[in-house]
Amino acid sequence: MKFLLDVAVAFGLLKVFAKVTAGQCRSNKCMVGKTAIVTGGSSGIGYETAADLASRGCKVIIADKADRAVSREALIERTGNPEVIYKHINLASFKSVREFAKEIIKTEKRLDLLINNAGISGIRNKLTEDGQLKVMQVNHLGPFLLTHLLADLIIRTPMSRIVFVSSILSFTNNLKKADMLNIPLNTTLDSMYAWKEYSNSKLCAMMAANVFSEKLQEGGVMVNSAIPGLVFSSNDPILNMPNNSPLNFIINKLLYLKIVLYGKNVYEGSQTVLYCALENDLNQVSGKVFADCMSVMQPPLAQIWDFRSRIWNKSEELVKLTESEKLK
C-alpha cells in the first residue's frame, strides 16, 4: 500500500511540475485595428489562439476546411468581438489555397499576423488531387504556397509577423533529401515509424520559416516557429497515429498515457503560438524556434543552410510558383 501511495505522490508531483513549467504568454498587447489569419482556427490550439486574438480586439479570419459556424459564433459570444470571420481553405488543394489568397488580397488592406496552425497526421502515403503526399501538403506545401501568395500584403503591413506551428516530432524525422517531399515512405521499412511523414512535414515547415525569415527580413516581417508541446486534444497528431503493427500499437498507447498524465490542454498549447505572435521582445527576432515561450534548439537539419535551400527549391517546384511569385 505504501508503494502505491508513493507512486501516486510521484505522479502527482510530476504533473504539478509539468503544469508549473508550462510557458505562458503574458503580453497585454492591444490588437484593435489589426488583422490576423489563423489556419485551422475552428478547433484545438487554433481555436484558443483565435479566441485570445479576438479578445484583444483583433479582426480574426479563421481559415478552415470545415464550415464550423458554431465555432465562429462561440468565439464571438466568448470574446464580444463581432469581427471573427470564417473563410474556406483546403490546404490539400493548391487551387483552394490560391482562391483563398486571392480573396484575402481583394478584401483586406492589411495582414498583421499569419499563423500557419492547421495540420493533419495519421494519413499514410495518401496523395492529394495535386499528386502530393497529403500530410506533407497540408502541413508544409499548402502553408508554403499561402505564405508566398500573401507575402506582399504582409510586407505592406508594418510590424507584421508570421508564425509556423511546428512540433517536437520534427526532431524524429528521417528526411535525407529533397525528393522525399513527394515520395511515399517505404511501408515495409518504415512500418515501425508511422509518424515519419508528419515529422518530416513539420521539419520542412520549420525550415521554410527559417528561409522566409531571411527573405522577408528587409520587409520588416518577423517569422518564427512555435512548438506547442504535448497537447491532450483529439486533434493532437500523436493521438491520431495509425496502429499498423503490434509495436506501433504499444508505442501509441504509451504515448497516449504520457499525454494524459503530463500533456497540456489546448489553452496551454496555444501559449507559445501567442508568444510568437504578440511578445514585444520579439519585435526584432526572426528565424527562431520557441517552446514554452522560450527560444530552443532546432533540429540539426534545420540549421544546415544548403539542405534547407534544397528543400525550399523543391517546394517551389511542387507548388508551381511562377517567377513573379517567388521571393528573391
Image: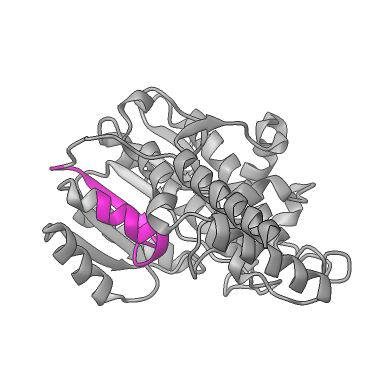
Q: Residue at x 62, y 31 (%)?
A: 297
Query: Can residue 101 be seen from the camera position used here?
Result: no
Does residue 181 lie above or below 190 as drawn? above
The picture places residue 228, in percent across and down from the top left corner, at: 49, 48
Answer with left or right where residue 182 lies relative to residue 65.
Answer: right
- Residue 224, percent from left and from top: 47, 36
Write the residue at 34% across / 67% down.
42
Front-lying residue, 206 or 182: 206
- Count the numbered circles shown: 0
Residue 21 located left or right of residue 283: right
Where is the N terminus found, in terms of image quarters?
bottom right
Quarter occupied by residue 171: top right
The residue range painted magenta reads 32-52
Magenta includes 50?
A: yes
Q: Is residue 261 left or right of residue 324?
A: right
Percent x, y of residue 160: 31, 35
Is 192 or 23 nearer to us in this picture?
A: 23
Of 6 and 256, which appears nearest the observer?
6
> Residue at 26% of width from left, 56% of height from top?
51
Is residue 65 in sight in this rendering?
yes
Residue 134 in the magenta stretch? The answer is no
Q: Vertically, is 312 above or below 250? A: above
- Above or below residue 25? Residue 79 is below
Q: Give the x, y percent position of residue 159.
A: 28, 30
- The residue under the point 18% across, 62% down is 78
